[in-house]
Amino acid sequence: MSQPRIVVTGATGFIGRALCTRIGDRGTWLALGRSAPPPTLPVLFRTVDLSKPLPKDVIPDGTDVLVHLAAHRGADNDVAGHFRGTAAATLNLSEAARRAGVKRMVLASSTSVYEPALPASRTLLEEDRRVHHRPLAYGFAKKWAEDAARLSALLEPVAELWTLRIGMAVGPTMREQSWMRTTLRRLQAGEPYPLVGERGHHLGLVALDDVTEALIHAIAAPLPSHTLAPGPVWNVVGEAMWERDVVEHLAASLGVTPQFVEPTAIDPFGWTDQPWSVAGDGGRWLREAGGIRPRPVRPVLDSVVRAHVGG
């Protein structure tokens, strides 16, 4: 695609800012959202509430790609808010994309959509049938949104749908309210860190720069051969680490000794030694994106710590 016209949601988020800063263009990029991005971000902007019925022209005719990064931020038990801000918004955008003749939709999902029922010692291979079938998850709002987008594309396949199930993206510009920055503050304060089980969650981590590269590839690359309709499904994961190992690495980078509180009660899912998060292996993403090698995660964690301390 030469000079693609791109509409992006979530431009003010952690991933959205990185993507727009990298390749945004005020002549061809339009951001949709309730809060305007900073003036330095190279995108045009239109104020719109994605959870409500959208204006007919919200996505300009002739748009090549819709990059949907936005999602509702709120407590897990805010079911109505998550449904309106994530699932309903995705359906609204899918309908607007069809009206505008969008050629490709790139949907940012999460590896947390998978059911946490794998043995704690393994990760989810992208060849696993659960990558292509309806995922089950505690994070059901994400599942609803992804299912809604894929169902829309299947029922009326006007556009390709690239689904990027992104692990925990890490980079020095992580927001103050992110889990990692919150953990750093707890470690600095000497607070004991609670774990579910001996090693905590099994986390699929990926450097923010790798996420950006994956999105750029999904925006412009030809459809991979032998791809099932409506389009590719990638687990964008560079490395799997146990939560305890991540916390210990952050603590070492801070120069403090972590303390852990082992669980005394059964967690909400009925076990104490299984992971809540499922770490995908990222195999298909790496192959179909040209066999790139993901960046090592630990140096990126160190950069997060340096930015946190310096800030």
Image (tube, grey):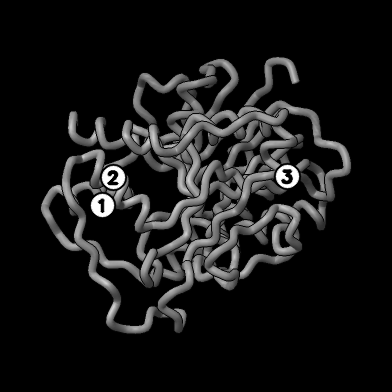
Mark nearer the N terminus (2 vs 3): 3
x%, y% of residue 263? 29, 76
Circle 3 — which element? strand
- Identify residue for label 2: 250
x%, y% of residue 306? 25, 31
- Measured along the vertical axis of the image, is residue 306 above or below residue 162? above
How far apart are labels 2 and 1 at the CA level? 9 Å
Circle 2 — which element? helix
- Identify residue for label 3: 161
| Mark 2: amino acid | Leu
x%, y% of residue 68? 57, 42
x%, y% of residue 218? 68, 34
38 and 165: which one is in front? 165
The answer to which image quadrant residue 105 occupies is top right
Name the residue located 62 percent from the left edge and 50 percent from the top edge: 281
- Circle 3 packing at 10 Å, graded few (<14), some (14-19), many (20+), is many
Circle 1 — which element? helix
- Circle 2 packing at 10 Å, graded few (<14), some (14-19), many (20+), is many
In this rendering, which labeled residue sits more in front, label 2 or label 1? 2
Q: Relative to residue 46, is residue 67 drawn left or right?
A: right
Do residues under tags 1 and 3 come within 8 Å of each other at their CB atoms?
A: no
Name the residue located 54 percent from the left edge and 61 percent from the top edge: 278
Do residues under tags 2 and 1 come within 8 Å of each other at their CB atoms?
A: yes
- Identify residue for label 1: 183
- Measured along the vertical axis of the image, is residue 196 above or below residue 269? above
- Measured along the vertical axis of the image, is residue 110 above or below residue 309? below
In this rendering, which labeled residue sits more in front, label 2 or label 3? 2
Name the residue located 81 percent from the left edge and 36 percent from the top edge: 224
In this rendering, which labeled residue sits more in front, label 1 or label 3? 1
Residue 151 can be seen in this image: no
137 and 128: which one is in front? 128
